[in-house]
Image (cartoon, coloured by chain):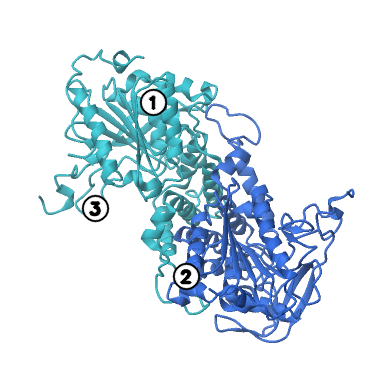
Chain colours: A cyan, B blue
């Protein structure tokens, strides 16, 4: 064992993001065309000779390319999914080549609202085209081609990332062998849309928002974005989990009978910290764009609202996971996915994990979650040994 | 049957609010003293000769004195609890004299942040003393004395109103025979506090808030208050209820593949309407004050956090009701109340009502809710006949 966590055997160590420039036009679902774009990404593990061991990680609302390891030895925190990606972890870097990108529309280096619009020479800001999940799939497809990968061993995503993984399975059924969908849904509920709309309203009503042109005004809608994050954060946690973590503990002082000036519950200061932290590092236009993509995602809309018909196109195997206390993407939403897959005659494994962490559970190394995830990924890894023939696509193996 | 709903046999018809001025000082829990105060109230039904048929209605966060009937024949909507108060309804005006007041700190006519501080001659605004549930009980006690009522037949409240009813049962055990606690809790959870704090943050960060002195600046923090209401509203509804009501229906237009300018889900416009409607009629300082009172309510804090010890003081009978889809004040919170009451040897009835309306269910005439409520209140009404002796206090009748 080494001295710092950055070089421990159970993580990928120091990693460096890279950027790829795509100069071919990208046709977007909205009708607009992105003339060129950059993608910032990280890779973990080694691509094997027949390029059959590649895994694509799709990130969620506020995620990015930095999923595992550390950027420097000074980093206090590893990538956002370091719990699941690394040697000996479910997404095992000793078996797989893992590609983790920042989606277009993001604010961590890939082309998005904070980038320069080449046509105007100005920051895109609110004029950045609205995106849909399928646009991310198209952009991820270009990355796939760049690496010369003809089929992903697996595409894996939680939440909004799971929506991208499912969209891949429908749009490019021959391009993946496994689709791992964690804490996701085929579409948002009215309540989910409502929370997103409240968060957007908090942002757009911030006087520093300036119709989305805050950067031109040398400002940021910090208050609104902070508030949006606070709302999001509460909904990503469970009631029981919050009670375990904070209870009704006060930050300082005691209750004087009836007096409450300056008295603050721990949960309040925690939320304010989360909001402030987020609002200085995340782009408000990206937040708006991402939540809209979430709201409008509807897996089966173009299949006459029939999820069975939608999934009939898929050829890959599916692993679906959910968490008992997740009320934003409840287990019932995952069971709808599973039911549709079963009805469509697809191979699907499903695990509902007991967890008190709410939606955030998918980021946390809960033992049973890790065991189930690892077990499934071991199968994916075992298959690699039998994949010397590139023609062995899953459609041939388990057509029903 | 008459032609307009305002004079139907099943409602109390046209009612007029009245105002009482109390010139005696009211000692508040915070240590401050309210030198004098006004209470605006309505009454329904007739006080009987021995004044044994009086019922106190305690309102919730954004409630007020206008609980039943109409203020004029032009009114489109009746009072907020017209579903439960009226001839032949659970709180039957042909049996009971019902007193419904606007609590101090409110913004509907009783002394509160929008009133003039007699010491300064200016609007109280943010300087209005912070209140606790027990302050409302003290103020309600003055009303009780004004009417010469020595014992309430029942004190009834939903949500924050239920907290007041329980506080009455502990502080003045001889002053009520029945305590009806609907969709309430002995204290808020961390999640509840978190939602309240987000709502408060939305208000206080509104540039028109001016540290609570918006009226002096001839403005209102409409955006912040609207946002606060939107947050509250989502949490008062259930996910299933919202899905039933709104689904993913669009307000206008259709999805163009990926295009979303101007497309709006029904649930979004509904929430904006709720927010705007509320923010023009409710006082922001009152909202802050009421949510703080909610957060700090902790039934057993002064009983070494032992709810059984707390309830041991009570002498009345209890009726507790909750609603299956209420996640803000979940059935589990009501069961905690019931368990403590049972352990304290008190008489308690409990009903968990199947309902998809979330926390708002307590305002809705759901058949089983009405039946159970009516059944219990019939008992309260039947008792009146045996109450010729004022000494027949419940402590004597069912001491255990």
Residue B369 x, y percent position in the rendering:
64, 52
Of B165 and A181, nearer the camera is: B165
The reply to whether dot 1 and dot 2 touch (C-beta < 8 Å) is no
Kindly identify which residue carries mark 2: B307
Q: CA distance from mark 1 to mark 3?
A: 33 Å
Which of labels 1 and 2 is toward the front? 2
Residue B84 x, y percent position in the rendering:
71, 57
| For residue A259, side relative to residue A59 (left or right) | right
Q: CA distance from mark 1 to mark 2?
A: 54 Å
Q: Residues within 10 Å of mark 3 (few under 14, many from 20)?
A: few
Residue at 46% x, 55% y is: A230
Residue at 39% x, 73% y is: A252
Disc nearer the start of the sequence (1/3): 3
Kindly identify which residue carries mark 3: A75
Kindly identify which residue carries mark 1: A168
| For residue A240, side relative to residue B169 (left or right) | left
Image disc number at residue B85: none
Q: Is residue B179 above or below residue B79?
A: below
Q: Is residue A320 visible?
A: yes
| For residue A157, side relative to residue A308 (left or right) | left
Q: Quadrant of the C terminus of chain A?
A: top left
Q: Is residue B74 visible?
A: no
Residue B94, quarter of the rendered image: bottom right
Of A16 and B164, nearer the camera is: B164
Residue at 76% x, 66% y is: B96
Of A100 and A296, nearer the camera is: A296
Do discs 1 and 3 belong to a common subunit?
A: yes
Q: Is residue B199 above or below residue A101?
A: below
Q: Residues within 10 Å of mark 1 (few under 14, many from 20)?
A: many
Q: Is residue A367 above or below residue A338?
A: below
């Amino acid at each position: 064992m080494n001295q710092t966590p950055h070089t421990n055997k159970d993580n990928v160590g120091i990693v460096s993001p890279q950027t790829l420039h795509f100069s071919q036009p990208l046709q977007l679902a909205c009708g607009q065309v992105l003339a060129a774009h950059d993608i910032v990404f990280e890779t973990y593990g080694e691509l094997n000779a027949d390029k059959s061991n590649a895994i694509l990680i799709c990130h969620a609302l506020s995620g990015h390319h930095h999923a595992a390891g550390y950027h420097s030895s000074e980093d206090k925190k590893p990538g956002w999914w370091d719990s699941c990606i690394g040697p000996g972890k479910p997404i095992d870097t000793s078996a797989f080549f893992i590609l983790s990108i920042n989606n277009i529309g993001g604010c961590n280096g890939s082309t998005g609202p904070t980038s320069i619009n080449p046509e105007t020479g100005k920051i895109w800001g609110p004029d950045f085209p609205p995106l849909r999940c399928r646009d991310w799939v198209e952009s991820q497809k270009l990355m796939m081609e760049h690496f010369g990968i003809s089929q992903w061993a697996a595409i894996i995503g939680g939440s909004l990332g799971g929506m991208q993984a499912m969209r891949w399975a429908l749009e490019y059924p021959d391009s993946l062998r496994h689709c791992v969908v964690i804490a996701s849904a085929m579409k948002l509920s009215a309540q989910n849309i409502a929370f997103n709309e409240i968060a957007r309203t908090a942002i757009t009503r911030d006087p520093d928002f300036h119709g989305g042109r805050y950067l031109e005004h040398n400002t940021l809608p910090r208050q609104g974005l902070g508030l949006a994050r606070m709302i999001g954060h509460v909904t990503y946690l469970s009631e029981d989990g919050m009670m375990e973590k904070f209870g009704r503990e006060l930050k300082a002082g005691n209750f004087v009978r009836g007096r409450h000036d300056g008295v603050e519950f721990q949960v309040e200061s925690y939320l304010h910290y989360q909001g402030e932290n987020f609002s200085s590092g995340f782009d408000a236009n990206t937040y708006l764009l991402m939540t809209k993509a979430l709201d409008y995602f509807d897996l089966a809309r173009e299949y006459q609202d029939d999820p069975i018909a939608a999934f009939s196109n898929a050829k890959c195997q599916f692993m679906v996971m959910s968490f008992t206390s997740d009320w934003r993407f409840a287990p019932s939403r995952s069971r709808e996915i599973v039911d549709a897959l079963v009805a469509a005659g697809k191979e699907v494994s499903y695990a509902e994990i007991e967890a008190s962490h709410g939606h955030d559970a998918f980021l946390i190394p809960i033992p049973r979650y890790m065991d189930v995830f690892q077990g499934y990924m071991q199968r994916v890894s075992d298959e690699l040994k039998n994949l010397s023939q590139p023609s062995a696509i899953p459609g041939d193996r388990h057509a029903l």
